[in-house]
Image: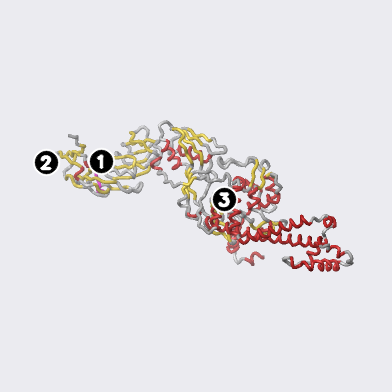
Amino acid sequence: MSEAKEHGSLGAMYSDYFLDYASYVIMERAVPHLADGLKPVQRRILHAMRQMEDGRYNKVANIVGDTMKYHPHGNTAIEDALVGIGQKNLLIDCQGNWGNVLTGDPAAAGRYIEARLTKFALEVVFNPKTTRWSVSYDGRNKEPVTLPMKFPLVLAHGAEGIAVGLACKILPHNFIELIDACIEILRKKKVEIFPDFPTGGVMDASEYNDGLRGGKIRVRARIEIEKRNLLRVTKIPFGTTTTSLKDSVVAAQEKGKIKISKIEDNTAERADVLVYLPAGTDPENARDAMFAFTDCEVSISPNSCVIADGKPQFLGVSEILKRSALQTKDLLKLELEIRLQEVEEKWHFSSLEKIFIEKRIYRDIEECTTWDAVIEAIDKGLKPYKKLFKRKITRDDITRLTEIRIKRISKYDTFRADEEIKGLEEAIKETNRNLKNLTRYAVKYYEELKKNYGKGRERRTEMSAFDRVDRAQVVAATETLFLDEKGGFAGWGLKRERAIEKCSRLDDIIAVSQDAKMRVLKVSDKAFVGKRPVHVAVFRKEESKIYSMIYRDGRDGAVLAKRFRIGGVTRDKVYELGKGSAGTRVFYFAVHDDEQESAEITVLLHLKPALRLRNVSRLFQFGEIAVKGRGAKGNILTKHAVDRVVKAPKD
């Protein structure tokens, strides 16, 4: 009944439920938080590992079990997320078979593999004194709202997720370049960063668009020509594996797009795929074909989305980096302020203790019979020295003095105490100095991170601008175009008919029929092109061919000649090369590579005998007419009936 009162209709109820679900998926599962770059499951895994941390490895199964105290989902989701973090090789020190990101091989079961936090993670991720806490889902534990991350982790790891109505795809960036960029931001300089992938490869990031929607990058495998008939893949594009790449090469070969004789995957710690080519194959053309038709080249569309200010926001990677650098500066300031307070407090009590023991104030309480008298006696003894302290001496301070044991008083070393107080005073000065020069301190912090953890994290992905491979130019001509003139069919499947020329399965063919109709269609195993066509060939639109034609307009019309170029066409559309009259017939049709060649062609027209017709043959040279578009109707050669047209012999 309460639900019925709360919602006015069933539609309103479902609308509320849908919004709740959508908000949950966005905020709690799919999109990382700007503050620490983590999704909730990742944050809870790291928190559980920190609680378990003792310097030794823990079974992944145990880590998963501890994480379930904070994460109200199944163990499979937690284990998959844990393996994903481990494979990034930044926060988790892995032991055992954690899978292979190059081949796509999965990790071993959680009971067989172990993990612990890296020194880097312990340094930059955790600090309970600066962490905001919340109660876990069952109320038994507390968990961090966000971890106090002092590094742009979301840009180093990358992130991907699909929520209700939006998606997130942040690409990984280089560890060292991120630190250098953070330093530049703190120095108020403009920065620009680009992705760097653990699988390496060659990347064209000219359209990266700061990682926002609408941008894209293209990544290629690194393919080396080992020999005339051997290609070696040593780096693969991000998002692929050597297994998927190998499958894509085999699929392209089966579809006739590339020609290979064998492929081997020898990948272990590094990618190593060998592609053997048939004898006579051009290796450079084969490499381009692999870029065009296989996973050796992929296009990636980033979509940088994070949770910020309590809602999902689309922020460019430079803005994320800027906010991360400023957050790190603020966290370092907070840590310094906490440290200053702790050191000052320690100095305060150490100084009190020194005076209490050296001035023998503890003897003033020997005759006291009440607690208040004890407090008053100590306070009176400290009165001459109160002006030496930075804050007021409280009753709690005096109470702590009464808790000092006789053994400590009897063995009190004044020299050692003075050295300790001097060290605390130096620490106070240094902390105040760092607070005053906070930017310099933050820059030094980043430089130390780079020095201590940057080794071996140099850029792996080569940046280079490259043109898209024209698929029509590199596709392997593995088929032969055959023509069945009598039936009017053309295709690669007509093995018993007349061979026209070599072709690929991506090619188009042009067909001109006896009645001067032209059509461009995709090549197939068998396609109808019209009975007894006058011309069938592979159509390559980049080739500027010159076509010569002589035709009769209708059954009794004039005979016309034309020279033309095809121009732009729409596949499967019928084009009239004549006037479209019924009974039109083509007498002569030829194709030439250039205009000069076509102009030199001379034909002989044989006319049908007729009354008062003295000359039944005449010569015509195509150079007499200009080259026009395919829509031109042509120039009249004769109105007499023509029997046939043949190419005139050369003198």
**Residue type of the residue flagged with mark 3:** Ala
Judged from the image, the secondary structure of the residue bearing numbered disc 3 is helix
Residue 37 visible in the snapshot? no
**Residue type of the residue flagged with mark 2:** Leu
- Against 331, residue 497 (above or below) is above
The mark that comes first in sequence, 2 or 1, is 1
| Left or right placement of residue 585 versus residue 181 in this view | left
- Distance from Cα at disc 2 to Cα at disc 3: 90 Å
Q: Which label sits in the foreground, 2 or 1? A: 1
Q: Which residues are magenta?
A: 578-598
Q: Which residue is mark 2?
A: 613
**Residue type of the residue flagged with mark 1:** Phe
Residue 520: percent from the left, percent from the top? Answer: 34, 44
Nearest the eye: 118 or 61: 118
Q: Which residue is mark 3?
A: 156
Judged from the image, the secondary structure of the residue bearing numbered disc 2 is loop
The mark that comes first in sequence, 2 or 3, is 3
| Left or right placement of residue 193 versus residue 486 in this view | right
| Left or right placement of residue 426 versus residue 612 in this view | right
Judged from the image, the secondary structure of the residue bearing numbered disc 1 is strand
Q: Which residue is mark 1?
A: 589
At a point 55% along the width and 39% down the height, the residue shown is 270
Residue ranking furthest to the top:
279
Residue ranking furthest to the front:
415
Residue 543: percent from the left, percent from the top? Answer: 32, 43
